[in-house]
Each structure stands twice: as structure tokens, then as C-alpha cells.
Image: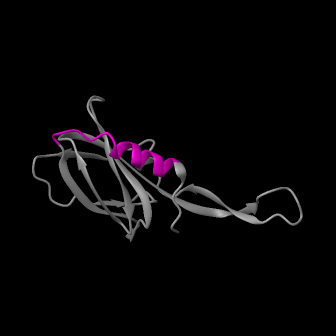
Amino acid sequence: MRMLTGSVFFVALAALGCQGDKMIPVQGKVTLDGEPIEAGAIQFQPLDGSGPTAGSIITNGAYNTAVPPGKMRVEIRASKSLGKRKEFDTPDSRMVDIIGEAVPSKYNSESTLTADIATKMGSLDFDLKTASK
């Protein structure tokens, strides 16, 4: 689905605004169970808690951003429709999507993903899984 919640969009845009002078270009692909994430966000946060964060929107599985050098915690988010519900509690109310997180929490709010951003970076890809293997 091509849904991107406001919070995911805000996180990515806020992170884009925090870029400093010594940024390293980083790009890559993000898949979930082998399929490209159609729309989402990726964020890089310094593991030591100091320094700027960076991030990007993910479109058709690809992202491109600039990240400060160092060891980073990586968070990846994407939305999906969990079903439909009535917008209002009336018989003629239109149906709206119920939106939820498509990516398991171990890749975002409880992320275990890390990356060591060096002066020269190749492609930094993430192959995420919904089931533990």
C-alpha cells in the first residue's frame, strides 16, 4: 500500500533538517520479506546520543540521504492498512482505512539495527523479516 502516516512523514522530514557540514552520502534499498517497502521512512540516530540525526523517505524500496559519520541506530517505518471502519457512527458513514505499522518494532521503536557510517559508503541495504528465523 502506498500509505504513509503523518507521523512517519514528519519524522523523516525533521531528520532531513538536522544535517550538518560533515555528512556522508548514503543510499540503499529496504525490503520487508523480500519485497521493497513502497512508502516509508528511515532514520539514523547516533548510538552515543550526541550529534545530528539524519533520515529519508523510502520510495519503492529506495532511499538516499546524507548521514554524519559514526555508529548509528537505524529505525525503519512503513504503514499498512489493517482493515476498514466507519468514519462516524452513522448508518451512511463512509468507510476509512485503519492504519498500522507494517514493520516489526525490532526495526523501529525497539530497533536493533545499527550501521557504521564511514567516509566512503557503498550501498547500505536492509532486508527486514516479519517472522523470526
Look at 89% across and 64% down and name the residue there: 91
Q: Nearer the viewer, residue 114 or 80?
A: 80
Q: Main secondary structure of the magenta part?
A: helix
x then y, percent, for residue 27: 24, 59
x then y, percent, for residue 15: 36, 43
Q: Is residue 73 visible?
A: yes
Q: Nearer the viewer, residue 19 or 122?
A: 19
State which region is magenta.
Answer: 7-22
Please give left or right for residue 47 compared with residue 1 in the image: left
> In the image, is residue 72 part of the stretch drawn in magenta?
no
- In the image, farthest residue toward the left: 120
Q: Is residue 112 visible?
A: no
Total residue callouts: 0
x then y, percent, for residue 105: 47, 48
The colour style of the image is one colour
x then y, percent, for residue 43: 35, 47
Please give left or right for residue 2 compared with residue 62 in the image: right
Look at 47% across and 47% down and name the residue there: 10
Quarter the C terminus occupies: bottom left
Look at 40% across and 43% down and name the residue there: 14
Residue 69 sits above or below residue 85 on the image: above
Look at 55% across and 62% down and name the residue there: 80
Image quadrant where residue 54 sits = top left
